[in-house]
Image (cartoon, rainbow, N blue to C red):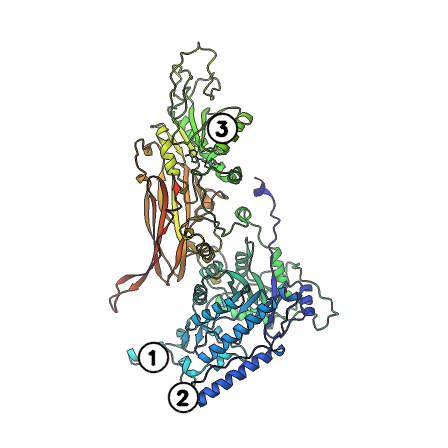
Amino acid sequence: MEFASSPDEYMPTFYIGQHESDRTRVTPELLRQAQDCNYDMLTTPITTPHFHSRVLTLLSNHLNELESQPTRSIPAPVIPSLSPFDTPLAPGETISQLLAVVSPWIDLCSPDPAVYNISRQVLELEVAYAAFCGIGNIILPSPKLHQGKLHGEGVTQYAYAVQEALNIGNYIQMSISLPMMDNPEQNSDEVVGSLAERARAKYLGLSENGSQKNSMEELEENEDGGTVIFSRKNSARFDFFGTWDAWNVIRTLCKYNNRLSVALSIPSHLPPLSVSSRWHSEPLRLLSITSKTFFKNPSGYPAFTHNHQALLTRYMGGIRNPPWLLLYDVGPIPGFENPETIVSAADGVLSPSEAADPPSPTPAEASQLQRKGSKKSTKTVNDPTPHLNYLRYLQSHQPPRTILERFGAGYQDYLQAPLQPLTDNLESITYEVFEKDPVKYDQYLKAIQQALIDWRDQSKRASGPNGRIVVAVAGAGRGPLVTRALQASDATGIPIELWAVEKNTNAFVLLQRHNEETWANRVNLVKSDMRSWKGPLQENVPQRSGCTGHWPPPRNEDDASNASMTSEAAPPPEPQPPTHGLIDILVSELLGSFADNELSPECLDGILPLLNPTHGISIPCSYSAYLTPIAAPKLHADVAARAPNDPEAPHTPYVVMLHAIDYLSTTLRPSTSRSATSESAPTPVPNIVEAWSFSHGPMNALPTASTNLHNTRHARLTFNLRDRAVCHGLAGYFEAVLYPGVELSTNPLNMEEKSPGMMSWFPIYFPLKNPLYAPDASTLTVSIFRATDNRKVWYEWMVEAWSNLIGGIGSGEKKRVRLGVSEMGSSKKGGCMM
Ligand SMILES: C[S@@+](CC[C@H](N)C(=O)[O-])C[C@H]1O[C@@H](n2cnc3c(N)ncnc32)[C@H](O)[C@@H]1O
């Protein structure tokens, strides 16, 4: 197939910017020089050190006043509007190539109201002025999660400030700087002149002399008479999901505003895969990379460890708008001091030794290596922008995209309403897209071939009037399965009588044309709904004794697959009343992304009574639907944005190529990687669980079914979570057994074994109207129903979150407490008409 074999000429786009913490302004010359070096953009502060000292003075005066007159109510000071001395920015042609950085010295999480108030004013002034100048992107400082003995208390007020700022700069994209995980020790890396330092001790839970008393220590001392003291190291524990949790609060309060995103700092030592997977599901606009993210390789060149390279590929790969990369404090723009200097552009061309991987450090080695790399390396690198050059090198060495990535380019996270091929007549272009998937049709070919071979080898009685096996393709579309049935017959040498049934009158025109032009009129075409078809017509077919219904047919028989042909040798038979025969092998492809969602069960119910009752075969013979809960913030934001105009949006199961998602329930499988870092520790594999299945064969034919109740289904599935998360919905997949040993699967757990490279179906997404939060070590219970009223079919779904607590003190008993229940999603209004 064309796109499977053509070389992948796609080259990912890396937009790379540069940030210097002590830069005070960006001149057009500096920007030009940076672009000559092959940077795409630079960061700029919005205000100057002059403004900073003005604000510090204002705050100090205010705090002094408050201290000297403790009983008076003194209003917070108002920062006077910006003067030309306060900002280096001005509107101009180059503004679109600048990323504006909000002053890092504010503290929007401060428990001290004076500090918070001033910080908010700074934020609002800076955002308003940057917006005025035409800045498109702003980077906000990280929320300060540890304040004295307080932990995470300031996140909501930070979120409130961001929400207000979003209203000021109506077109500005805001990215919040966040480390991948919460490391309280890093949090203490203070910015010079930070307002946080001015916060008063009484708000930080500190004694007047500034010493910190931990609330856990107090608790333990009270309860146990001071026998157990928590060490500071323990109380300030490393929290892998701490910064994600803060982000979740902020974006939730900001109602998943699509102008709000994350500027994620990539650390030198990567957290477990579950953490990087979580961030992968979030709107990453920037990846911040400092010189510490690199390790020196044996040539002394700064390079990424194997795991960092894999992370970058994961975050950047296969998407239309990958995050931008921002190099933080990796050295000044070369040649700027002397504009006459000619600086070569970082073109990413490195020798093998320059591009070699550095050794992958263990956690303990990471910091040591860092120091060794930066201080003790004797190798000197003759490259003024080695970090940039290395990233450009990685850009040109990204792995080629998989078939699925190529096919799905542009479809990632794009919500589509599922097809309803029963109610609607599909367009030719839709069939054309199906037909581009060679894998599905190869599997059908294998299944039909095997069914024919087994039929012959088991000497089963066939239903054709001349002893041929009767094959019917139900829902033939433009005919690809008809072609496969003919190929199977030709390849096995087993003659068949072939029927093709299609209700789409437009597609039927093409079937007729194919029959004449490519199938040599070997196919009996029927324009009908398969449920009202009476079966293969046997009128005028002479019934010759000794050759009816048995394998093999007589050797000298004509190729009489066309039902209107008669034998020349025998005398003309007596005309017989029209009769309808049976189908031996029924081939259909009526599957949707959740197997039964395009009403395959209902359609097949109508034709299964025609199946040979003893030996009949349905291809597929069974299919099952699978589910797993996911975090999908991007999809949630998209559905929520549609809801005001379309109240059914949160009640629609969508077909979507899932990309920015995180599987919430996973099992750790041992990794095969050799590296000793945590990134190569056991790999989380999603728990994807069967909801229900349908089987189709002679045993399942229901000639007298008067209701559709037998096609209802219900499942209640339990998923254990290790890490706290937000569930935005359910991802649905399917597996189908075409014929024993020949399967189709979209289930990520086995699709590569069962039908590798198949791309006919994207997964299905059942959204939750309101996301459901679940803490660490909790359980999600999914209830899902396939419902019918005999006119249509629809789904209903809901999720419950449970905490798994240990019962009362000393009891040790496990106790489940329901933490929350989602609304019931229901596609009843948009259900599939039967
Ligand atoms: C998913 S398409 C598959 C088409 C084709 N077999 C292929 O694999 O490319 C399903 C086809 O079944 C047809 N179809 C669906 N329900 C049908 C019914 N009840 N009777 C006849 N045709 C039906 C649709 O019109 C459509 O052409």
Q: Quadrant of residue 663?
A: bottom left
Looking at the image, is mark 1 or mark 2 earlier in the sequence? 2
Disc 2 or disc 3, which is closer to the eye?
Answer: 2
Q: Can residue 299 be seen in the rendering of this structure?
A: no
In the orientation shown, which residue stands out farthest toward the top?
571
For disc 1, the marked residue is 218
- Mark 1 neighbour class, 10 Å CA radius: few under 14, some 14 to 19, many 20 or more: some
**Disc 1 to disc 3, C-alpha distance:** 81 Å
Residue 711 lies left or right of residue 477; in this view the side is left
Residue 374 percent coordinates (x, y): 59, 71
| Amino acid carrying mark 2 in the image | Thr
Pointer 2 residue = 71
Give the Cα separation between the discs numbered 1 and 2: 30 Å
Q: Nearer the viewer, residue 299 or 434?
A: 434
**Residue type indicated by callout 1:** Glu
Q: Judge whether residue 120 can be spotted in this image.
A: yes
- The Cα atoms of the two marked residues, 2 and 3, are separated by 95 Å
Near mark 3 (Cα within 10 A), the count class, few <14, some 14-19 or many ≥20, is: many
Q: Position of residue 375 (x, y in %)?
A: 59, 73
